[in-house]
Image (tube, rainbow, N blue to C red):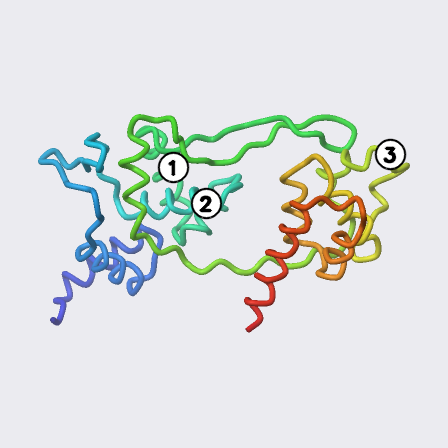
Amino acid sequence: MRLQPAELERVRSAALVAGETVATFVRDALHEKCRTIEGQRPDVAGAVRSSDGKSAPQLGRVERLVLAAIVSLPGLRSVATVAAAAGVSWSAARGALDSLSAHGAVRFRTWKQSWRHGVREIGAWEPEVASENSAGLLAQTACVSLPPQPPPSEHSGPLPPQLWHLFWDHPDPSVLKVPDDADYVANRLLNGPSASAALWAAVHLPADALRASTELRSSRPETRDLVKNVLASRDAALR
């Protein structure tokens, strides 16, 4: 089928609004046209009825991409990071976040975190699982394909300030560096009280430091399991 110039211009305009290339926009539009989501039935009012019988608003394509990104990639702290994860423009992501918040699909949760010698407030976007629309809204992301994410890189340089408080007995955590102090940092973070710090270590510290942390007598079983899975994932990514 050949598009007329006026039709092609409308497609280009729609892709520009969505913050996508024409090829991506057309591919996703065709995917949306053909897709069937198990357990959902559109209502006459444009809502989606989930398998539990509850009706939820019908989400647009960009809204589904943004919601899928927030569900799949925890810790997205800004509109820019959400836009990059979803593969849309900043303005498209901002509009989708506003709409999803109004539907009760997502929220921006804030909390306090130790920072250097004080406390700072940080936040991240997360799905609003307590919403009455939650099941119907989340089900609409079942067929969404997010753009490929670049693999995380090993950290090189000073220990990030948000981790300093976990080295409370060190005279000056700011002087700790990776990879020079990677073994010490890995042991403290992987076997410490913070799950998020352990996850950061598993993702960003060198493989040798991770292995060394599991050989210590103080290493916990869950730490060894985490490291084993992480190293297996890294090896698979290299194949």
Give the structural element (helix, strand or loop) at label 1: helix
Q: CA distance from mark 2 to mark 3?
A: 37 Å
Q: Secondary structure at mark 2?
A: helix
Lower position in the chain sequence, tag 2 or tag 1: 2
Q: Residue furthest left?
A: 44
CA gap between label 2 and label 1 equals: 9 Å
Which residue is at the front of the view, 89 or 64? 64
Residue type highlighted by circle 3: Asp
Q: Quadrant of the N terminus?
A: bottom left
N-terminal of the two: label 1 or label 3? 1
Q: Which mark is residue 138?
A: none
Residue drawn at 55 percent across, 73 percent down: 239
The image quarter in which residue 50 lies: top left
Residue sitting at x 39%, y 33% = 106
Give how far across and how far down residue 228 sits, in percent: 64, 57
Graded by Cα atoms within 10 Å as few (under 14), some (14 to 19) or many (20 or more), the crowding at tag 3 reads few
Q: Which residue is mark 2?
A: 82
- Mark 3 sits on what residue? 169
Q: Which residue is mark 1?
A: 97
CB contact under 8 Å: marks 2 and 1: yes
* Residue 140 to residue 106: above or below: below
